[in-house]
Image (cartoon, helix red, strand yellow):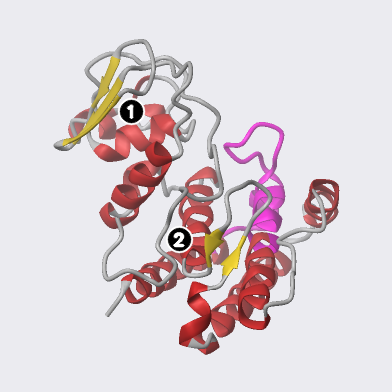
Amino acid sequence: MTVLDDLKTELSAANDRLLAAVARLSDPDVAAPSLLPGWTRGHLLTHIARNADSHLNLMTWARTGVYTPQYPDAATRDAEIAEGAARPAKEHYDDLAESTARLDHAVATMPQERWAAMVSGMQPPEHPAWYILSRRLREVEIHHSDLGSGYTWADWPAAFVRRELHDALACWPREGGPVSEVRADGRVWSGLGEGPVVEGPSAYVLAWMTGRLTGEGAGLGDRAGAEGLRLAARPPAAPKWPAASAPAGLPAAPPEEYP
């Protein structure tokens, strides 16, 4: 067994949770604001669907060896999101379900040896194809919480939080970082820059790093207090996230465990 088995299982469960949430949305719901400034839920859902297709492009590149960019360019990506945002809820659901199924099929039929093929997103560095699953899982989990439909960063699965926190800190810009150290559930990252130490439960720290922690309890009210989600001190704003598509130096072949 390799990390591929874990990532496939986690991604399937994340897709199921997201699709179940989208199935409950009405037309007014998808037209309402998401938690991302300037985007309705319709913008966000279109982005998640087109992101599935973009990762399918990377799977095609890895399988065939023929350069197939994730997106043609940023302007095309943004135009597709704007164009699809105002659709009714049923169309959003169908689009997301169909794009998810296309990517699932590509994952299920990928030749084992092609998981080590190198691809790249819109940001460097290049990474092996197996990491596509981690990138897609990131999009599904983070943006599910951005819908503002009941699923929050406090609901992110522990395995996802552990991996994503590891990768976010592996990509951390060491020059001029706003904090000196991050501590989360027994793990310590030092030499991050100048500033205070950030310490807290991993999900809380990841929410801060991804810009999803705003205000006391991030809008969770008593739930945040009940779960003991506290930082040692109020941290400054985290650097832009994600700082890179993938950590540098990933093993080409899917490892048995990651991280």
Is residue 50 visible in the rendered image? The answer is yes
Label 2, secondary structure: give it: helix
Q: Residue 221 has which mark?
A: 1
Relative height, residue 81 to residue 183 (above, below): below
Splitting the image into 4 quarters, where does residue 225 fall?
A: top left
- In the picture, measured across the screen, residue 24 lies left or right of residue 225, that is right
Residue 127 picture location, percent across and down: 53, 59
Q: Which residues are magenta?
A: 24-50
Q: Does residue 45 show up magenta in the picture? A: yes
Residue 68 picture location, percent across and down: 74, 69
- Considering depth in this image, is 30 or 6 the residue closer to the camera? 6
Q: In this view, which residue lies farthest toward the top?
A: 195
Quarter of the picture containing the N terminus is bottom left
Residue 24 picture location, percent across and down: 54, 62
User: Residue tagged by mark 2?
Assistant: 134
Residue 206 picture location, percent across and down: 37, 37
Q: Quick one: label 1, few (<14), some, or many (20+) residues within 10 Å?
A: few
For badge 2, the amino acid type reads Ser
Label 1, secondary structure: give it: loop
- In the picture, measured across the screen, residue 78 lies left or right of residue 124, that is right
User: At 45% from the left edge and 70% from the top edge, which residue is drawn?
Assistant: 16
Nearer to us: label 1 or label 2: 2
User: At 82% from the left edge and 49% from the top edge, which residue is drawn?
Assistant: 82
Q: Earlier in the sequence, mark 1 or mark 2?
A: 2
Relative height, residue 152 to residue 116 (above, below): above
Relative height, residue 180 to residue 107 (above, below): above
Splitting the image into 4 quarters, where does residue 45 fall?
A: bottom right
For badge 1, the amino acid type reads Gly
Q: Residue 45 has which mark?
A: none
Is residue 28 visible in the rendered image? The answer is no
- In the picture, measured across the screen, residue 92 lies left or right of residue 169, that is right
Q: Disc 1 versus disc 2: distance between alpha carbons?
A: 31 Å
